[in-house]
Image (tube, rainbow, N blue to C red):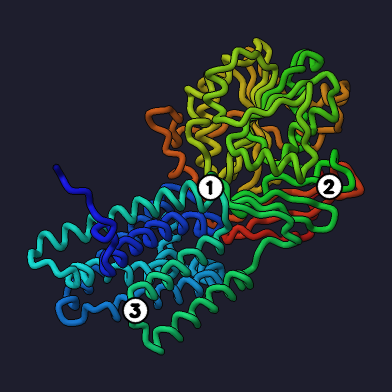
Amino acid sequence: MASTPSVSSLRLSRPELAVFVSGVASMGLEILAGRMIAPEFGSSIYTWGSIIGVFLAALSLGYHRGGKRAAVHASNRRLVGVFLVSALYVAGLIVFGDVLLQATSTLPLPSRFASIPGIVVLFGPPTYLLGYVSPYAAELSGRSEIGAASGHVYAVGTVGSIVGAFATTFLLIPALSINQIALLFGLLSVGTAVAIATPTVDRDEALWSLGITVALLVAAATGSVGLGVGGNVVYETQTPYQELRVVDSGDTRTLYLDGQPHSAMDKSDPTRHVFDYTSYFHAPYLFADDPDDIDRVLFVGGGGFTGPRVFLDTYPNVTVDVVEIDPEVVDVAKEYFHVEEGERLNVHTMDARQYLQQTDETYDLVVLDAYKKDKVPFQLTTVEFMQLASDRLADDGVLFANVISAPSGPASQFYRAEYKTIREVFPQVYSFPTVGGVVVQNIEVVATKQDTRLTQAELQTRNRERDVGIDLSTQLASYRTDERTGDVPVLRDDKAPVDSLLDPMVGQRYVVEETDANESVAAGRVTTETPGGQTAAVDSAYTG
């Protein structure tokens, strides 16, 4: 009969523990890097490719240097030093991470490579040090066969990486903030150093372990010295999809997703349009043959539910369905933005495309409000998706897409590709830039199934004759049709290069017009997103 392994045989040796924890920490930091880098540089394929490449390069260099030094320098004491220095660097990462990212973002590099220096500075050193662990552990394993020693070490390290990947993704990020997760990895490194040194922890190792632990706790308590979003942060979390913050500045409450403003509400007047672009949500009532026929509306993307609130407050006959993939966004909208489900508001927490495939509802208006400046779910941009949306629209239904892009120039590629894609499905496509100029802004795209195109003059006449809840004469002045699309692709499921189309917008400021609190749409402020994802309000001469 086969013998049952004893508890002692299953216990990790000190070198094995070091390798296992190095795998956990390196993979955990790699996933955490995506969340720290995203507010500054976005989370495109270029950002993630840069993160993976930098981590692999740092580990490889650590393996190489550690392997050359292992025969002479490998010792438990050296492993203790590796983990303590790594933990100390993590403490510095918590405090100075934002500052370092903002500094590296100013380097004159092509946008798709812009995140690499920041990733190298923030995560290269600790990952390089962790690369020393495996060759040192192989030398200390006591195995005489080189192949057996290295194979065992890398197997243990890979198991640690698997644990780090799953634990960070499914447990830590949904539950903790970035600083709390970094603190956890720092304390894990210190604890591992103590475990490796035990039972002969000398005075220096004890003092260093205690001092670095204190540094980690102080760093986590004080947070980053970098500039945050202006105002009082009333709630923040890491969701499975993004970093989320709710910020109060005076009477205005703003929802930030990955550092970008997505919804705003005047706490003293929740029905007011804080961001001017939301006033364009009324425009579909000018494109419908009979505005009274719009009584079933679907929003793809919830955010702070500004759009749904517009329809529920303005049009008493309307029922609104909202599809929002992030359950935390829905919870925040209910708790902080006065959103209540009821007979006229139904919220579905799932992927929008999946919902459209499964539902048998017919809508009079579908609003696409799920795009970000630097992160767009490609499956919601393609011809196949637009056809699916068209199939769920009534014969006289309207599609309304809130696209963040520039209307012309190099940063307009995504907008023009989306315009071209929508035109493949809908006979008539119109667009309305909300700010003017060639800056990155909200561009409202309207598409209908009608055979006849409405002129700007006809829309202005309808605006005068119809009561749609707001005067849209100024908004209609930005009317555009027949965009230049010869140099951009039609987006399809099998080829939708969204990341490369968004790439020219990296580093560009995102301009959002704010309305004056005393007038429904008036001279206001321009809220600009800097390349660092921060916001600042400045006076604007624009009147809308």
Q: Identify the residue position indicated by label 3 in the image.
A: 199
- x and y percentages locating residue 461 in the rendered image: 83, 23
Cα–Cα gap, marks 2 and 3:
60 Å
Does residue 273 appear to the left or right of 379 in the view shown?
right
Disc 2 marks a residue whose amino acid type is: Asp
Q: Identify the residue position indicated by label 1 in the image.
A: 374
Q: For label 1, count other residues whose C-alpha is less than 10 Å away and answer few (under 14), some (14-19) or many (20+).
A: many
Tell me what residue is drawn at x 44 percent, y 51 percent: 167
Tell me what residue is drawn at x 47 percent, y 57 percent: 32
Image depth: mark 2 or mark 3 in front: 3
Q: Nearer the viewer, residue 149 or 255?
A: 149
Image depth: mark 1 or mark 2 in front: 2
User: Which corner quadrant of the image does residue 282 belong to?
Assistant: top right
Mark 3 or mark 1, earlier in chain: 3
- x and y percentages locating residue 511 in the rendered image: 67, 51
Disc 3 marks a residue whose amino acid type is: Pro
- x and y percentages locating residue 232 in the rendered image: 75, 61
Q: Which of 141 and 110 is in front in this view?
A: 141
